[in-house]
Amino acid sequence: MTHRIVRNIERPDRDIVETLGRQGVATVHEAQGRTGLMKPYMRPIYPTARVAGTAVTVSSQPGDNLMIHAAVEVCQPGDVLVVTTTSESTDGMFGELLGVSCQAHGIPGLFIDAGIRDTAELTEMGFPVWAKAISAQGTVKNTAGSVNIPVVCAGAVVHPGDVVIGDADGVVVVAREHAAAVAKAAEIRLAKEAQTRERLRNGELGLDFYGLRPKLKALGVEYE
């Protein structure tokens, strides 16, 4: 098997990435047809964690973080690391020192389908991480992998340069080539939700607003 590090990738406009980040995971997921979510076991290490960035992908061997170190070199400010392993792992492959290195190179966050360690220190640093597990199990730096190849992270396909958004609701991936269209669709959705919110705040029932009474009747639901 050939292992490689791809240095140059295409990225969407930074303004689009920032817009998607403000819109949030739930809205973006709905706006792109309820696709792109990572599995719900990917949780942030602190509740207020929030980030959006362009993916630099990492394929590593379980329990080996050599390729994470290699990936930091090819990142540009605003890139986020998306790390997978070639088979299931919960080993603590990322910790405080790698977090310090990421911050020094303008990497605002990490998504890893494996374990992390030093969560207290990473939280204190304000470095947002979404991970499968927390484990003090250490790792080695011995085995080749690849950087900036298509990967599957927590059930979601991620290509280099895709937009990855994380917040308290989870993680969603937006394909680079669709980022602008999804951001526009999400803005429309947010405007519509604002109108809905106002009507519900004024006391209108969801049954009437969403036209659900005929559905109840069609389903045979009877009032007593």
Image: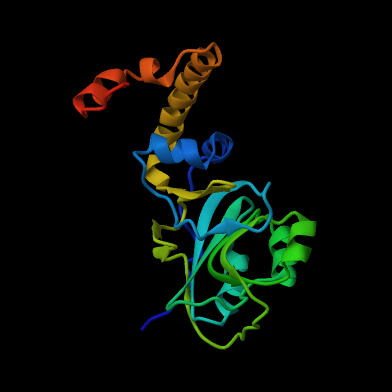
Colour scheme: rainbow
Q: Residue at x 40, y 34 (%)?
A: 31
Q: How many badges with numbers are in the image?
A: 0
Pick the residue in front: 76 or 98. Answer: 98
Residue 109, horizontal then vertical, whole percent? 63, 56
Residue 191, horizontal then vertical, whole percent? 49, 20
Q: Quadrant of the N terminus?
A: bottom left
Residue 22, horizontal then vertical, whole percent? 58, 35
Pick the residue in front: 133 or 61. Answer: 133
Q: Residue at x 58, y 72 (%)?
A: 115
Q: Can you say whether 74 is above or below 193 in the image?
A: below
Q: Quadrant of the C terminus?
A: top left
Res. 160 image quadrant: bottom left
Residue 83, horizontal then vertical, whole percent? 52, 67
Extreme residue in the bottom direction: 142
Pick the residue in front: 1 or 194. Answer: 194
Res. 96 image quadrant: bottom right
Q: Can you say whether 6 is above or below 222 in the image?
A: below
Q: Is residue 32 left or right of residue 109?
A: left
Q: Is residue 32 left or right of residue 108?
A: left
Q: Residue at x 52, y 86 (%)?
A: 143
Q: Can you say whether 44 is above or below 185 in the image?
A: below
